[in-house]
Amino acid sequence: MSRASSTSSRCGGNLTDPQKSKPLRYAIVSDIHSNLEALNAVIAQIDAQRADALLCLGDIVGYGPSPNECCDVLRERDVVAIAGNHDEAAVRAAAADRFNPLAREAIDWTRTQLTPQNREFLAGLPRERRVDGFCMVHGAPVRHFDYIMDVTDAQHAFGRTAEALTFIGHSHVAEVYYQDPAGRTYQQRLLHGGRINVVPEFRYIINVGSVGQPRDRNPQASFALYDVAAQTVEVRRVAYDIERVRERMALAALPELLSERLVSGW
Ligand code: ZN
């Protein structure tokens, strides 16, 4: 597969801060979806692992009961974030037009809750960022809100980018797609976590899974740690207090189905 096709792209939005030394270990979260209990459980693990920087691949809000608290936790930790489709829908009226009725109901509620500061924070998020030689997008390179669900999707996605390492979320399924030098693409699910050794001959699209609404039949929160020196990416799963979130969702009168799916992880 040619890497120089006219549709291929380098990820934009360079992040450079000459004042700070380069992080060695990145904690990468995605699809928090206003689930504060799951986010706090993940943050505790991240602190225990002593990550140097926190990155978020979007969908901070939507579905869950704690949109402001989740924005506040991330902002306090100087998160480097990009926008997901729910973040855009929470701050732009037309962006929710294609949402299903349950997602729409939750985003309408979220709009009524967001503080002006958090609305401004979400509205200011770019759709892609390049950090330390890798790329962050919510769903897929170039077509940011496309879903990568299988090898065919990933093969097309690799064809649209020249990046060696891209981190994604959006499908809420923790997994890795990698492409060999001959252009063949492979998929490995990370339902119970796992470690990926990043080798220079291969290219990678790594889905870090969802913090706040996993859909890979494992209800535990998912996140990743990228160790730059070791060239490893570790996906971890973390148990959290699901019943507590469900109580908050009931108090906010959010749809029951959105609450039930947290239990099954689907
Ligand atoms: Zn999402």
Image (tube, rainbow, N blue to C red):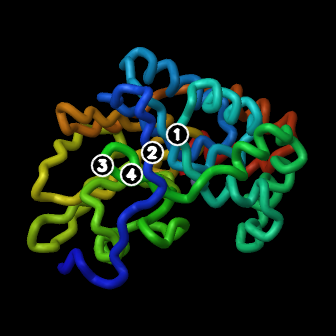
Q: Nearer the viewer, mark 4 or mark 3?
A: 3
Q: Amino acid at mark 3?
A: Gly
**Dot 3: what SS?**
loop
Residue sitting at x 40%, y 61%? 11
**How packed is label 2: few (under 14 Cα within 10 Å), some, or many (20 or more)?**
few
Which residue in the structure is indicated by mark 2?
15
Q: Nearer the viewer, mark 4 or mark 2?
A: 2
Please say if 170 is above or below 209: below
Tag 4–tag 2 contact (CB < 8 Å): no
Which residue in the structure is indicated by mark 1?
80
The answer to which of marks 3 and 1 sits earlier in the sequence is 1
Q: Is residue 8 left or right of residue 61?
A: left
Q: Nearer the viewer, mark 2 or mark 3?
A: 2
Residue sitting at x 41%, y 33%? 18
The image position of residue 228, as x and y in percent, is: 25, 35
Q: Is residue 6 left or right of residue 211?
A: left
**How packed is label 3: few (under 14 Cα within 10 Å), some, or many (20 or more)?**
few
Which residue in the structure is indicated by mark 3?
133
Tag 1–tag 2 contact (CB < 8 Å): yes
Res 258 seen here: no
**How packed is label 4: few (under 14 Cα within 10 Å), some, or many (20 or more)?**
many
**Dot 2: what SS?**
loop
Q: Amino acid at mark 2?
A: Leu
**Dot 1: what SS?**
strand
Q: CA distance from mark 1 to mark 2?
A: 9 Å
Please say if 135 is above or below 184: above
